[in-house]
């Protein structure tokens, strides 16, 4: 469920084009203009990756690309900041993936 428009100068998410992306192999509906982080949170996904040392869950923290807590894998590219990356139709997002060297 998306946030409902509460004031007249905010865009209405329901009026934007919707499409699907795949997260961990499952399709989720997103709206044009959303970031990956917004789409994940709207779908109930709170853990984006695990910390390197302690393997603790990490998710959206600062929301502006400074903290790097929202890293995901997008179309095979590791360490993409979900809070800054807009959704693109058909994109493949993976959470909690570790880069193996």
Image: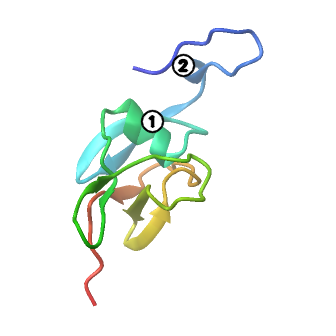
Report whether 93 appears left or right of 68: left
Label 1: few (<14), some (14–19) or many (≥20) C-alpha neighbours in 10 Å? many
**Is 64 left, or right, of 60 in this rendering?**
right
Quadrant of the image occupied by residue 55: bottom left
Identify the residue position indicated by label 2 in the image: 14
Q: Earlier in the sequence, mark 2 or mark 1?
A: 2
Residue 67 lies, in percent from the top left, at 53, 59
Q: Position of residue 37 (x, y in %)?
A: 46, 45
Q: Position of residue 97 (x, y in %)?
A: 26, 67
Specify the farthest residue to the right. 9
At x 42% / y 73%, what residue is drawn? 77
Front-most of residues 39 and 50: 50
Percent position (x, y) of residue 18?
49, 32
Q: Is residue 78 left or right of residue 83?
A: left
In this rendering, the answer to whether 14 lies above or below 87 is above
Residue at point 26% right, 73% down? 53
Give the residue pinned by disc 1.
Answer: 30
């Amino acid at each position: 469920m998306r946030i409902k428009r509460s004031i007249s100068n905010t865009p209405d998410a329901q009026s934007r084009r919707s499409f699907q992306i795949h997260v961990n192999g499952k399709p989720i509906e997103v709206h044009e203009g959303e970031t990956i982080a917004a789409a994940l949170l709207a779908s109930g996904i709170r853990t984006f990756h695990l910390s390197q040392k302690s393997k603790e869950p990490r998710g959206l923290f600062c929301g502006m690309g400074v903290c790097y807590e929202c890293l995901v894998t997008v179309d095979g590219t590791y360490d993409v900041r979900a809070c800054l990356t807009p959704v693109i139709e058909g994109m493949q997002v993976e959470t909690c993936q570790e880069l193996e060297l």
